[in-house]
Image (tube, rainbow, N blue to C red):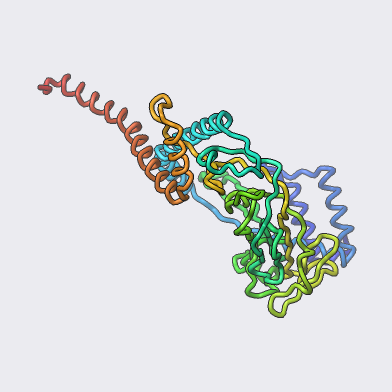
Amino acid sequence: LASMHVSTKCLLLVALLAQAVRPGGCISFSNSTSQRVMEASSLAKDPIMFGLAEEKLAQFPETESHQSWFGRLGNAMWSVAAGALLIPLSLALLWINERRNARQESLISLGRSQARSVAAEACEEADNDGMLVHLDFADAHGIAEVKDSRFPSVRMASGCLRLRSRVQVFQWQETKKQEKRKDRLGGGESTVTRYFYDKRWCDQAVDSSNFCERSDHLNTVKVPNLILGHEEVTNSQVKYGASYDLPPALVQQLGAFRDASTLVKGKLSVGSSKFELNVHDRWFYHPAKTGEPKVGSVRVQFDYVPDGPATVLALQANSTFLPYRLVSRGLCGGISDDDLKKRLLAEGRKTVANFTTKMRAHLDLSCVCAAVAIWWPCASQTWLRHRSLLLSTGTWD
């Protein structure tokens, strides 16, 4: 240790004390501590390795915050108050969830008993209108053109059911790790927050202005005005067999994606930014991938669902399909087949907005019922206690 610099000796002394001090207040040295001291001394003799170690430690800054005993008590009281307020809401959500599960089980049971298998090439729209039909062994064909809105050069005139693109940017990411320590005196609590930084591919730009260490971890995007993340285009005109049209809701359930890098004709570009295809991972990179990517680099991947066989289980409405939903079937199922078909078709044509309004009404009603269920026992006990007090004092009339 005599050959070390003064600052190095100070660092070793601090590390030694931090490893040796025990919660009881005494200082002890173990074999592992001595080994770490020997490793630190050998590290300090190598200026290059010592510089790398200092740089690595500088990437993990830490902050410390303190909370008094009164602050902890206040947070606990707020938690209790919030929990009491959330009880009616939780009961309402539980009731809605159980109701949805019961409806789903009923729907599956009815679907199993009422589904009718239909040949995809047979034209039986009149007989099966308003019925739950099952079609298999037919192909879905995309008729309309499909193209990516961010990259217009990626398009297919036909034969594509779904086209999906994913744009990522290479960014610094900040990770926080907190450690809570209770004070020996006063009942307070200290929180030590350590910050770790690494680089990774992200689906959205990361704002580095909120980092603890901003100077060495600045995030940029080398392709300006490019929308990051996932984007998907569904073919607006899809034929199933020779007689049926698939609605977009059913097309979106087809998930046999394949690589679509071969659909790119010529160079892929956004403004003046050119992307190059990497044949190993099938991503397009800007700048071209020659090694470790730099912060701000952008990459793009394309995949699509081509024409192919599909299976349909839905409510038939002429030559297209609708969702199969629960409807009222009268007392003990006493409803005619024609009325049942009309109700199923009317329910299948409802939009998401209709169900959102209905769900809000159920939620409001269940919240009121839960609040009454909680308030009524408390109010009853208070009234009985007050009545007993009046009877004991002789003031009850």
Q: Is residue 61 visible in the rendered structure shown here?
A: no
Residue found 71% across the figure and 42% down from its top: 137
**Relative to residue 295, is residue 375 drawn left or right?**
left
Rendered location of residue 300, percent (x, y): 73, 65
Name the spot of residue 94 as percent of width and height, x first.
46, 35
Horizontal arrangement in the rendering, residue 6 relative to residue 62 (left or right): right
Q: In front: 68, or 171?
A: 171
**Which residue sits at x=68%, y=51%?**
140
Up-down relation of residue 90 to residue 62 (above or below): above
Question: In the rendered image, which quarter is residue 28 located in?
Answer: top right
Residue at the image position 28 percent from the left and 26 percent from the top:
381
**On-image quarter of the C terminus:** top left
- As displayed, is residue 393 above or below residue 261? above
In the rendered image, the vertical position of residue 71 relative to residue 142, given as above or below:
above
Say which of 394 and 160 sits in front.
160
Residue 363 placement (x, y as % from top left): 40, 42
**Residue 147 sits above or below residue 28 on the image:** below
Between 34 and 49, the one nearer to me in the picture: 49
Left or right for 276, reference 174 = right
